[in-house]
Image (spheres, rainbow, N blue to C red):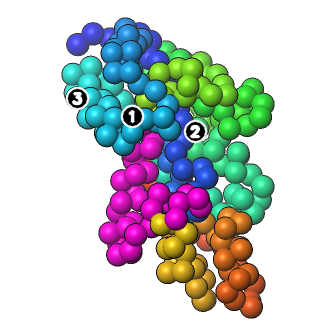
Amino acid sequence: MNVISVWICGIDEAGRGPVLGPLVVALCGIPNTDISLLGEQSIDDSKVLSKHKREKIVAWFEEKKTTHRWKCCIVVCEPEEIDIAVYENNLNLLEAQTFSKVIQLFDCHEHAEIIADACDTIPERFTNRIISHCKDWSNRNYALKSEHKADSNHQIVALASILAKHHRDLAIEQLKQQLGIEIGSGYPSDPNTQNSLSHLIGLPQPHDCVRWSWKTVQNFWDAHFDVPLPIRSSYGLSHQTTLF
């Protein structure tokens, strides 16, 4: 088997804005000699692709994992952890920490050039935050840069956005099955999501799948209840991680 000398990696998230469900961060890595293959699939930012197109690309990626050693790492942040970050005005910090976790899951021994989609207004600060939370960064042969709109400018980051979006879509579908109601996409602008709030927000507290810190939830709570909206604590929090 040929040794891969350079990996090209992209990192992006899906689900920062929804009122329901998780935030998902994905890193995908491919050998630099395979980068031209991305152009053959018309890969683009997940937000501009149909669900059918995203699923087609995911199936293609799954095949390449077997034939070309491509890799993907996923970290999922559940609503409870997101809420606590919002309470502390550190949602960008939570993203940086989560980006660092997928980098540590990747954990290859060859050189890796990593591009991250920056949520911070200052991309360099986002890069520094990610690195500061990566254990043994100085011992890793990685180069990291963060960019605004990296998912539009780099197909490897666009591929990461597709994988993150697909994983979140699966999580939302599973949540629908568990709840037995239609919840839509989870975004506050979705009518189905809005309609589901009456089933998910009630005394003594909102459902665990709801982001209690969102203004949408506060407005609904204030309109229906005379007691303060509960605040989540950090007891028992953990990341869910996947390497595949």
- The disc labelled 3 sits on which kind of residue? Glu
Where is residue 165 drawn, in percent x and y?
44, 44
Where is residue 235 drawn, in percent x and y?
61, 71
Q: Is residue 168 above or below residue 207?
A: above
Q: Is residue 237 visible?
A: no
The residue that disc 2 covers is 99
Name the residue at 21% across, 22% down: 67
Name the chief secondary structure element in magenta: helix
SS at badge 1: strand
Q: In what quadrant of the picture does the C terminus appear?
A: top left
- Pointer 3 with pointer 1, Cβ within 8 A: no
The residue that disc 1 covers is 72
Where is residue 238 drawn, in percent x and y?
53, 60
Label 1 packing within 10 angstroms: few (<14), some (14-19), many (20+)? many
Give the spatial CA distance, label 2 vs label 1.
13 Å
Q: Is residue 149 above or below residue 205?
A: above
The disc, 3 or 1, on the residue closer to the chain's N-terminal end is 3
Give the spatial CA distance, label 3 vs label 1.
12 Å
Q: Is residue 141 above or below residue 61?
A: above
Q: Residue 120 sits in which quadrant?
A: top right
In magenta, the rendered stretch is: 162-191
The disc, 2 or 3, on the residue closer to the chain's N-terminal end is 3
The residue that disc 3 covers is 63
- The disc labelled 2 sits on which kind of residue? Phe
Q: Is residue 211 visible?
A: yes
Label 2 packing within 10 angstroms: few (<14), some (14-19), many (20+)? many
Label 3 packing within 10 angstroms: few (<14), some (14-19), many (20+)? few
